[in-house]
Image (cartoon, coloured by chain):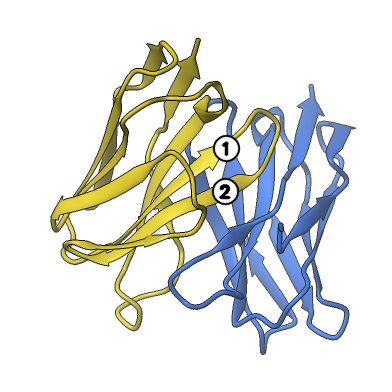
Amino acid sequence: SQQGEEDPQALSIQEGENATMNCSYKTSINNLQWYRQNSGRGLVHLILIRSNEREKHSGRLRVTLDTSKKSSSLLITASRAADTASYFCATDSKGYSTLTFGKGTMLLVSP
Amino acid sequence: SQTIHQWPATLVQPVGSPLSLECTVEGTSNPNLYWYRQAAGRGLQLLFYSVGIGQISSEVPQNLSASRPQDRQFILSSKKLLLSDSGFYLCAWSYTPGLAGPQQFFGPGTRLTVL
C-alpha cells in the first residue's frame, strides 16, 4: 500500500497564486522528500525535511512537517506556468535505502 | 557531475516477447540503484533495488527480474511480457547511505507499451 497520500489529486490555479499540496503517511519516518515530475519525464528532487525539523525553505518552496499528525505540506509561492507538473511526496519508512512514493498532486498553473 | 541514462526511451512489444531495459550511471561509484514502474496517473511502485554488484532486492513478486552486472549498470528484464507490464519505467540512483543525503536521482524513463 502507498505510504504517502497527497491531496488534492489535482490543483488548478492562476499564475502568481500560491499552491499548497498535502501529504499524509502512516508509519514513522526519518525524513520526507518532495519530488517534481514534468509530463513524461523523470522525477526531480525538490526538498528534504528531516523528522526533527518542522519547516524548511528553498527559494519559492516551503515545506512543513507535523510528525504527530503524520503529515507534510508543500507550498509554492508566486506560482509560474513553468511550475505545472506533478508533485510527489516520498518517505523512507521502509529503511534508509528505499523510498515509498504517494500518487502525487497534478498542478496546473495557467498564465 | 553525475548523470543517469536509460534506454530505450520508448518501446512497443508484443505480449509474450522478452524485455531488456538498461540503466547506467556516470560520475559516481557504488551507488544504490532502483527500478520503479509508474502506471498512468499513478504514483511510483518500487520494483527492485540494489546496494552492490549482484545484490538485488525485489519489492513486488511479478513477471520481471533485475540484474546488476557492473557497479553502475542496472538491467530490468522479462522472459515473457504481459499486458499488465505496460507502463513508464524509471531508474534512479542514490549515494551509499552515510556518504550524502538519501535523495534519489532519476533517469528520463522508458515508456513500455505491451500489445
Task: Name which of mark 2 and mark 1 comes first in the sequence.
Answer: 1
Q: Tell me the residue at 28%/43% (across/down).
A: B4
Left or right: residue B84 versus residue B77 is right
Residue identifier under label 2? B45
Q: CB under 8 Å between callouts 2 and 1?
A: yes
Question: In which quarter of the view is residue B93 placed?
Answer: bottom left
Q: Measuring from the top left, give residue B89's x and y in whole percent.
A: 45, 35
Residue identifier under label 1? B38
Q: Measuring from the top left, give residue A25's x and y in whole percent.
A: 77, 68
Q: How crowded is mark 1: few (under 14 residues within 10 Å), some or many (20 or more)?
A: some
Q: Tell me the residue at 88%/79% (across/down).
A: A69
Q: Tell me the residue at 78%/44% (across/down).
A: A78
Left or right: residue A53 versus residue B52 is right
Quarter of the image that includes the N terminus of chain A: bottom right
Q: What residue type is labelled 2?
A: Gln
Quarter of the image that includes the C terminus of chain A: top right
Q: Chain A is drawn in which colour?
A: blue
